[in-house]
Image (tube, coloured by chain):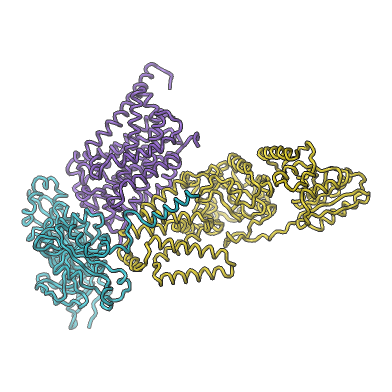
Chain colours: A yellow, B purple, C cyan
Amino acid sequence: MAFNLVKALMSRLMRRARRGGFDISAGSSSHSGGDRIDPGLLADDSLDVGARKAVTDRLALDARLDSNLRMLKLAAGPSPDIIIRQIVTDSGLHAVVLHLQGIVDQKRIESVVRAVSSAGAARAQDLMTELGAHLLRSSRVKTVASFTELWDALSDGLAVILADGRNQGLACSAQSFKTRPIEEPPTDTTLRGPRQGFIEDLTTNLAILRQWIRTPNLWIEETNLGHLTQTRLVIAYVKGLASEELLAEVRQRIQRIETDSVLGTGPVEDFIQDTHLSFFPLILRTERPDRVVGNLLEGRVAIMVQNSPFALVAPMDYGMLFQSADDYYEPVPIVFVISVLRVIAFWTSILLPGAFVAVLTFHHELLPTSLLLRIVGDRAGVPFPVIVEVFLMELTFELLREAGLRLPRAVGSAVTIVGALVLGESAINAGLVSPSVIIIVATTAIASFILPTFSFDISARLLRFAFVVAGGSIGLFGVEYGIILVVLVLASRRSFGHPYLAPVAPFITGGWKDYIFRTWHWAKTMRPKMTGGREPIRAPRGQMPRPDASPESEGRQQMRPGSQDNKTEGQ
Amino acid sequence: MANTAEVIANRQLTAILFMMRTTVVISFVPLLTTGDAAQDAWAAGLITGLLLTLVAWGVAGLAARYPGLTVVDYSRLLLGRFLGTMVSLVISWHFLLIAATDIRIYAELMRVAFMPNTPIWFTVVAMAFLATLGAWFGIEPIGRTADAFLPIFAAFVALTLLGAAPSFNLHNLQPVLARGLRPVLSSVWTPLGIGLQWVSVGMLFPFLIPESRRVRSVVLAAVLSSALLAIVVAVLVGVLGADLGSKSLFPFLKMARSVRPTRTIERIEILGTVAWGLGLFAGGSTMVYCGSRALSQILRIAEYRKIVPIFGVLVALYSMYAYKDAFQLVGFFRPPGFPLLIALTAGVPYALMWASHLARHLGRRRTGGAGK
Amino acid sequence: MRLIAALAALCLALAATGCWDRKEPDDMVFAVALGFDIDDDGDYVAIAQFANPAAAKGGVPPSSQPAGSAPFWTDCAKGRTPFDALANLSPALSREMTVSNIEVLLISERLARRGIAPIMDLVARDNELRLTVSAAVVNGDLKSLLESQFPEDPIPALSIQRMLNPIHFIDPSAMSPGLLQSIADMLRPGQDLLLPVLRLNAGAGSESGAEHGPDSASDSPSDSKSGVGSTSPGHAVTHIGSAAFHRDRMIGWLDGHESRGANFARSRSQHTPVSVRSPAGGLVSIHVAHVVSTVSSRYMDGDVSILIKAKVEGHVQGQTGLEEGQAGVNFADSESLRDLRSCLAQCVREDIEHALAKSREYRSDFIGLGNAVYRRLPRAWRAGVGDRWYELLPDVEVDIEVESTLTSPGLLRESLHY
């Protein structure tokens, strides 16, 4: 009979999860306070996790302290990091202070314990009121009435005070998470930018965001994902800038997620992307706050998850693959040249081996005679066809690359360099491969490292493989076919409704100012049409640096904080 | 995706039409190889451009007067149900013809110039598949792809012309217009007939945005492509000479193969061939799309995507079996057969539709109707 | 899962077995030079020079390599048509032959005199051959020329190609910018072909009267001494003179002067040394850097007449006649400069006249006089002049106007005094 009850409860639970709901304050599914359920159900070892969850979701705190403690024991097990401090107050009331070890600040706990033990109220309700007033020093005080709320509070690092005779507890903040310091992310470094990167703690990350964007229009919405992990997920956007349709789409996709665990942003990305079969990333993943902030200010939405330093930015377009944070801190001509180099490097890394194979096996006439004879001369005696040679060397380089990733840093680079040199040299001397193929493969590998976002992505390697097959079987016709196919598929992709190839296709002239090649900051007077279309004018024109006509007339008054406000965004 | 209204920008349609026309006429250069214009082919190109502009204006103008309707719709409206349906079927056949013939020309080029042992069916099926895939994705991705490829296309054609420029000899173009207008006019008809591609405007017009400049964009495509063609033909004659040029099967390719721009840069024919492939994709997929839409409208099938694979297969079959070999393909385009065919099957219906439209218009005015 | 494996296997199969047109470079043998001859039976003989890339890459002089690893070798075969002859080369080859990387196309004198139209048809029609190859007529044995070695390149075809397409100095004779120009010349109404000539030196007795390499002195225009040959032992081949064609048959040779004149008239000369008589005695060498000439036709007294206008630009490179205290040309004196200029113009005019004389003698209109009539007076051409042009050619009136400029006296303002 208990089992049937559990099953009925489970179905109700599922239905409620599907309906979902967002709150501004961090919330868990609300407690409806209906029929009481016996925590003793949890003593049954044969219950699986879903059934256990169904039971614990319905548990409510009891007035008696010991039954609450029993409930805690049954639900959370004998975990040694749940610290239960039994206290008898000065007025004789029994109370406990609960906290999870390791995520609380011991000094705060001590002060809470002292506050509790020195409380003078006689009845439990008065105790709670007095503590609530007395403990106003804490930043957050709230009541907990159900087991779920209790456990959420404990997991958040709050200390929970339960008193005998009251079926509600009091939770007050005492968090002190151990987090790593904010430092530059290893995957995305810059020469001139801030040395800041997101860390695993979501609160700190949000604080960083708030420091960058101080307008109150930076709105943040939070929810929990994952039945077992209850991971906090947050979306951030600039209200009034990000389009409401985009927000609705993002919210809808996140709310659709139904899973048991969310370990970082990777799973979230899997759930919410437009299509899972995509060679090109459809959501930007970055660790740098300045990149996230820049995109937020263009009307995009950022998604961050607890325990992951990577933030997701949606929607993404093709040009964002080629942007690195450094582009905004270096002078424009340098950035222009380097951006061109990046685009060339990207397409080279995908097309070069295929084109090489195609030209050598199908289109000899396209090579100048001396070059052709030189390449053919080098290849004399190699027992493999060109395409097999290229496969072999590509495979070897991929193996070296992966090996270099896994080895400890001190040894890794030495091994890969030596491996590449020795392997390449020996292979040539053994007559198994020709030097030209090694050059091609090495150039491809180097070109693939140039991209800031894309370097280790398996999909680029798959594309390269596909082009080699196409080039080796039908020559340059196959390579061209592949290019058309890739561009066609890219053109049909949308990332959250935003065409992936914009502003290349559809061609939006304004969008090119800050695409792969950027212009000076003073020239960026308009926001990108597709995402920032709600508030197109970013800055007034005519701010090019120029010698002032009368430099002395303005600027006599000293600067004061807040005096810039009337000059910001065109109203 | 079934019910979302697809839209493409005017500029994208211009790009598609431009690339479609330039591709075909650059391939075997009918301005030079059909008719008798020889060194005055550039003049024939200008005249063709003029006439094509009129044709484009005619097609687009009629479509603009029935906004929201495709040619299938207003042909039935203007010519009655039976005749209208006949005309729509003929126009669907045009889409098939254009796609199949363009693909076949490309396949012949591949076979003759680059890969003599690859059978025709392979290239045809591959390109037909690509066109079908494009049509399946919809006119929006096709438009965007055309947008993305247009600069590359134009750049490659321009680079080929630049590479050939050092070998340009003005004497080849002289004496200018010495033989009078008749030989020049004889070369005009086939390229004009290839302007049949503008029939796609009839199907695509309802999807264009913004509405104010639709006709202009269609006409602009005609003007631009004709200007480019006149230039190309002038350079061709200047480099190859009138005799060699008009006797080559693929003069543009021949020109690219025969010049050596600098000591190191030698083999530039690959640029033209790549450009050709890009243009073929844009044109072929648009044609398959228009054909599928037209057929689905005639047969009253709601979802055009169901017809796309069938149409693709038809295109491939037609391309493979309608022409036996390169000789027959070349012969197909020779005047007066080809221009007459186009005039009868496309010119006459459009003339009738215009006449009917004007009659209705005048009739309404005369009776003082307050209608549209 | 199995579907994916099947697709992967298909891809790899495609990659491994290859498709119809796959030609591994190891399966090919590359012909770098092609020569055509015709034998007494009327059969075409194709002689091809093949490259051996493995041996050619070192840059080691070919003579020091063991036999069998020579950087190139030649082969020849007969056939009833040029393509037939080419195809008949294959049975003797262990790999498939490809002619897509030909650098030069050589034609023997015998074949040239019989007519090169079949060769041109082959080159224009074949999908492997290109019109960018340089063509030349061979004065001597074609096979030995293709077998002779050049010290600069291990593969002679590359040297021959460079010889025919010089960038800078030397080359008083015809340039060969590629077969495209040649075919275009042949096809143009009222114009005939002029192909450069390669002459085999070593051992083969050179005809008296033919001139040798670029360092020959050419003095006063009325003289035409045969210079003393001073070819270095390494060079077996010299590029001098041209062959004049009538339609597609070769009619005769042009020597160095006449070729130079022809190129002056055709505006195709690049850098040419000309030695003119100095007003101060001796000779002045002028490096003619730039020649622009136009050939135009007009009506004069009811007859067609041609005007060749040439503009010549050069600078002084040296002078003789400076011994015993001679002052040399006084470059500051405008009078002597004017003299010098007119001497230059006179020299150029005489070269052109020589070329014109040969053109009339051979009835080969390589200067393009007929083409000028065709272009400027099309109605006259159509009215009958075109059909009879070769009869009219010897008698048509031709005026030659030469305008010369001296840009600089070189790096010396005045001559050195000894």
Q: Quadrant of residue C149?
A: bottom left
| On screen, residue B330 above or below C304 | above
Provide residue B332's location: percent of width, then percent of height: 24, 39
Q: Quadrant of residue C196?
A: bottom left
| On screen, residue C95 above or below B130 | below
Query: Is residue C235 visible from the viewing direction of this image?
Result: yes
Q: Is residue C405 left or right of residue A157?
A: left
Q: Quadrant of residue C150?
A: bottom left
Quarter of the rendering occupied by the C terminus of chain C: bottom left
| On screen, residue A428 above or below A83 | below
Residue closer to the observer: A312 or C341: A312
| On screen, residue B51 above or below C363 | above
Residue sitting at 86 percent across and 49 percent down? Answer: A134
Provide residue C163's location: percent of width, then percent of height: 23, 68
Q: Is residue A139 left or right of residue C403?
A: right
Query: Is residue C339 visible from the viewing direction of this image?
Result: no
Residue closer to the observer: B97 or C86: C86
Residue closer to the observer: B187 or A362: A362
Provide residue C103's location: percent of width, then percent of height: 25, 63
Q: Is residue A313 left or right of residue B1?
A: right
Provide residue A523's location: percent of width, then percent of height: 52, 51
Q: Is residue A310 left or right of residue A144?
A: left
